[in-house]
Amino acid sequence: MDDTDILIAGGGISGLTLAWWLAQSGYRVEVWEADTRVGGKIQSTQQDGYLMEQAASLLMNFRPEVSGLIHHTGLESKKTCRNKQAGAHRYLLHQGQLTALPMRMGGLLRSPLWSLRGKLRLLAEPFMPVGTDPDESVSQFIQRRLGREMLEKAMDPFVAGTLAADPDLASAAATLPRLTVLEKRYGSITAGIIAHRLLRKRSACLTDTFSFEGGMSTLIETLANTPGVQVRTGYKLRELVRSPKGWQARAETPHGEYQLNTKKTVLATPAPVAAQLLDNLDTELAELLRGIRYAPLAVVHIGMQRKHITHPLDGTGFLTPRSAGLPINGNLWMSSLFNGRAPQGKVLMTTYLGGARRPELLEYDDNHLLNQTLQSLQPLLGLQSDPEMVQIQRHTQGLPVYHGAYQARLQAIEEKMHCLPNLYLEANYQGGVSVRDRIARSYLLAQRITAELPITRTYDKKDNYAPTLATDSR
Ligand SMILES: Cc1cc2nc3c(=O)[nH]c(=O)nc-3n(C[C@H](O)[C@H](O)[C@H](O)COP(=O)(O)OP(=O)(O)OC[C@H]3O[C@@H](n4cnc5c(N)ncnc54)[C@H](O)[C@@H]3O)c2cc1C
């Protein structure tokens, strides 16, 4: 039977970045991916000259771990930054019109998005008392701190459109950790933001929105080719058994069964898969994982002639509040955001449907999803013809939604994991769903593993990257 230092089951962005960090320290790492390709949710596809993303479309970064990884993988030269001129605005749907969301306080106070009463309520935020309920929902938290208008017009579309969650059910502490931490640390979100702005003036890492030449798959391919990491596709982890040195793992592979001895094993799979694999080790732990809800998502890409759309598409796209009653959660103007996404004179737009707000939409066929998309976009963007290119992707388990007493669930999972030494969980159901959060979180786990496992240095790399970073993942 073969052996390795660390086995990672799951070759999505969580598993691959963890493998990258560990390989930098010289460990022998194997990644088993059940599918025939790596990347998990992330996949860039091409059709008729359009370049599309089936999940993550962009990386919005302010974390030094991400900058370090991009730099040291050599991906800096392949970064494609947001086209700031063409994609300057972020729109919200407000009273049937796309209205630019102001990004600064002055603009916010002049914006037609909020009533005078709503604006006064925003200004009162620093004087609101600090909350005490650890299970407060996003809706309760935002309404308490920023008022009902901010919840309905901005936070509801943001949570539904970018996280596929329901703000009434989503845990504020788990879903908006940065905002809840600001309240805890500074007594107010406004005071926290001002303090952070002042600190950031001295920091090199400002917010940066980007993708890569060839799309997000370029990041995946680069990570999958990390020297020292053995990636095996078509390897589905079936069973884990404790062994004197760590774990014995059994995979189902295209060539039959394969077994491996590992010192440490990481499950970088979706929660239901982790639950299945842990069932025979700890049924209560498996139940906690099984209780994590996933929202389904459909992604509808349409390509059109630029001249057949009346809207200037001068932004990143728009999000829709629940009150608009539209079937779509948001629409990204990919060809405004990044160059090279559509052929000359054409545009690519990506629409998201479903999520916790409208999960039933995924039960409809592609024609229905396309019709719902076009009927929603037509009056807002002035579409004057049918699209010339359509591609539809369905994710039945799109994103984990951090609903209910989520922090308590994660804490219970963590406590139970302490009884299973040398076994770890690392995926987007804990610590954030974004690619940025995945990279930053996997760095923390890599640090933990490095502290626990002496390095054998069977794989040696001359220019090891060992950043000294803060241990706070938020
Ligand atoms: C529609 C959509 C849009 C998004 N947009 C953005 C965005 O613009 N920006 C952003 O930052 N994030 C975005 N995200 C979020 C981000 O893409 C995901 O959270 C992230 O890719 C999840 O990565 P992961 O590795 O945790 O999980 P996954 O990608 O699900 O990977 C898990 C892997 O485990 C494998 N696996 C399962 N069972 C086994 C087994 N038994 N053995 C071995 N392998 C197994 C699976 O095949 C899969 O490859 C979006 C997500 C979706 C769905």
Image (cartoon, rainbow, N blue to C red):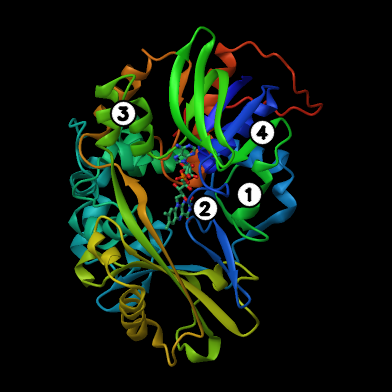
Q: Which residue sits at x=56%, y=49%?
A: 36
Find out if the beta carbon at label 2 lies less than 8 Å from the nearest ligand 1 atom: yes
Label 1 to label 4: alpha-carbon separation: 17 Å
Amino acid marked by disc 4: Gln
Q: Amino acid at mark 1?
A: Leu
Give yes or no for contact between labels 1 and 4 (Cβ–Cβ under 8 Å). no
Residue beneath disc 4: 230
Mark in front: 3 vs 2 = 2
Where is mark 2, residue-wise? 42
Disc number placed over residue 192 in the picture, else none: none
Instruction: Please identify the quarter of the rendering in which residue 457 is found.
Output: top right
Q: Tell which circle, 3 or 4, labels the residue nearer the N-terminal end.
A: 4
Q: For mark 3, give the secondary structure.
A: helix
Badge 4 marks a residue whose secondary structure is strand
Judged left or right of residue 422, residue 29 is right
Of the two numbered discs 1 and 4 in the rendering, the one whose residue sits closer to the viewer: 4
